[in-house]
Amino acid sequence: MKMPERAVPALPATDRRRWFSLVVLAMGLSMIVVDGTIVSVALPAIIRALQLDLSDALWINGVYSVVFAALLLTSGRLGDRLGRRRLFVAGVVVFVAGSLVAALARDAQALIAARIVQGVGGACILPATLSTVNAIFRGRDRVVAFAVWGAVISGMAAVGPLLGGWLTTAFTWPWIFLVNLPIGVLILAGALLVVPETRAGIAAPGLDLVGPLLSTLGFGAVIFALIEGGTFGWWRPHAALQLPGFIWPATAPIAPIPVIGAIGLLSLGLFILWERHLARRGRSAILDLRLFRIATFSWGNLTALCVAIGEFGLLLVLPLFLVNILGLTTLGAGLVLAAMALGAFGAGAAARHVAARLGGPRVVVLGLAIEMGALVFAALLLGPRVSPVLVAVLLVGYGAGLGLASAQLTGTVLADIPVEQSGQGSATQSAVRQLGAALGTAVLGAVLAVALARDLPAQLDAVPGIPPAAAQQIAATTRDSVGSVIPVLRAEGGQGRLGAADPAAAAALSAGFAQATRTTLFAAAIFLLLGLLFSTRLLARANASAAVAHPAAAPP
């Protein structure tokens, strides 16, 4: 059953303003997508400058996506009610303000707060771009517009590390945020000049306030548990947790993490029940669960979730490895990671032509298979002496798969969604992608932390001449600094804290960090394998839908 909404008609097919609008919307999308990945390559420099630990680093990298995902459904619905261009403009203003605060931050807390503000702005921008594209384009033009949108998502995510590496090396890390200020001004001017206002007339009464609170609490609590598990203990307490007006003591029988995680899962369960309750009563809800009865939408979103987890987990761990283990500069690491953008843009541009022969769902399956293969090879070959050129070549392959899959996934997921529900559909899909980004940082960050705690002491134990207490301390310091101690120890060359054992210790720590990186990449590959399996179901359901709609043209 469709939502009782009426869509604003698309602009006439002869109106060239649509394509100028697409350029402006793509610029806004590029700004927020780049900001989701630009921090990754600058993270080693930020860790050193602000004296961060692993938990701080994960929050700075991940809180943007957490807030993004938690607010997307709400903002998508607000855009349907208030106007999508209006929401887009408001989002750009908030995002630019958050960028300015981030550039001025001088400690972890201020930077995390600024990233939260950026996440709020991004959550307003992204659904407004996709639902506007869905509203103003029709037929073959919509296919092209969706391909552009998907290519921007995949390609600009890969451009972020290159831009971050250049800005951090040529200037300083605050410039990865300051660059958003002039870009934001251009986007605002373009939006006011060429982007049309669209909205859906929502007849369902009421405004869902409980749903956003439950979804935000649920997502936030689950991500908090995943990121902070290593700090406070997964089951037995490691440290006291201080909350406003409350302290969870280190002497408690269990750690706070399982309790917080359970609260998050319970909140998400209540969120689903609440949205169903609103739908049964015919009241306005931020998430129309009936959309998930559409098989291509359900399987496509599961596929997108796994793709995002794998991609953002990769972008978390590889810059740390390239800078701290291979000794590259931030710019050098950005250049290696830019190989992914090269593959993504090339494949994204070709995806439409490949899809014309194979069909969009088959291109998604092909792209995911290429992604997973490249990632598995990278995990097998990674080591302290691996050539950065080889890593770049593998990332070209990974980016090609990502470009093929992402460019066609958007249109495939929304293909069977009625136009009048485009705001709901696009916001839901965008939320799933951002949830995957947050989970990629949190889950694979947790995998990295556990692997470092296992592999660093194991490698140091084999080094003679290091007292056990010193080995334990240096392993813990390396883990907490996410590897930034290793270049310092390597540079001391026998004149540092471990004396003549410095070079051997640095080599052992490098080997341990490389092993932990391989473990994390294998974990990311598992998520891509799940995405590949889900994409085969997407292909089957898309073929079934095509057979019903066009029996003579359906594939055999």
Image: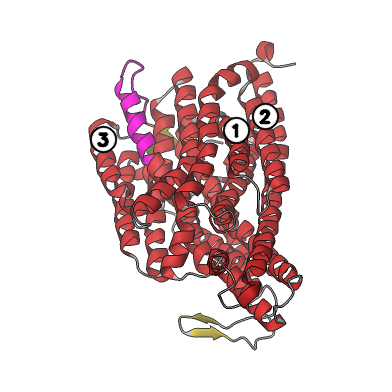
204 to the left or right of 196 = right
Tally the numbered discs: 3
Count neighbours of disc 3 (C-alpha within 10 A) and say few if under 14, some if 14 to 19, many if 20 or more: some
Say what secondary structure mark 2 lies in. Answer: helix
Q: Is residue 208 left or right of residue 356?
A: left
Q: Amino acid at mark 3?
A: Gly
Q: Which residue is depicted at the point 53% across and 62% down?
A: 58
Percent across and percent down for residue 371 are 65, 37
Seen at 61% across and 69% down, the residue is: 479
Tell me which segment is drawn in magenta: 8-28
Marks 2/3 in contact by CB < 8 Å: the verdict is no
Q: Residue 540: within the magenta?
A: no
Q: Amino acid at mark 2?
A: Leu
Pointer 2 and pointer 1: residues touching (CB < 8 Å)?
yes
Residue at the disc numbered 3: 190
- Percent position of residue 459, x then y: 73, 67
Q: Which residue is mark 2?
A: 366
Q: Amino acid at mark 1?
A: Ala
Closer to the camera in the image, 169 or 25: 169
Q: Residue furthest bottom?
A: 251
Residue closest to the eye, 499 or 153: 499
Residue 19, magenta (yes or no): yes
Indicate left or right for 400 with 15 as reference: right
Query: Marks 2 and 1, Cα distance to the nearest angstrom?
Result: 7 Å
Q: Which residue is tagged 1?
A: 405
Please say whether residue 451 is visible from this viewpoint. yes
What number is the disc on residue 114? Answer: none
Q: Is residue 214 above or below residue 335?
A: below
Marks 2 and 3, how far apart at CA: 36 Å
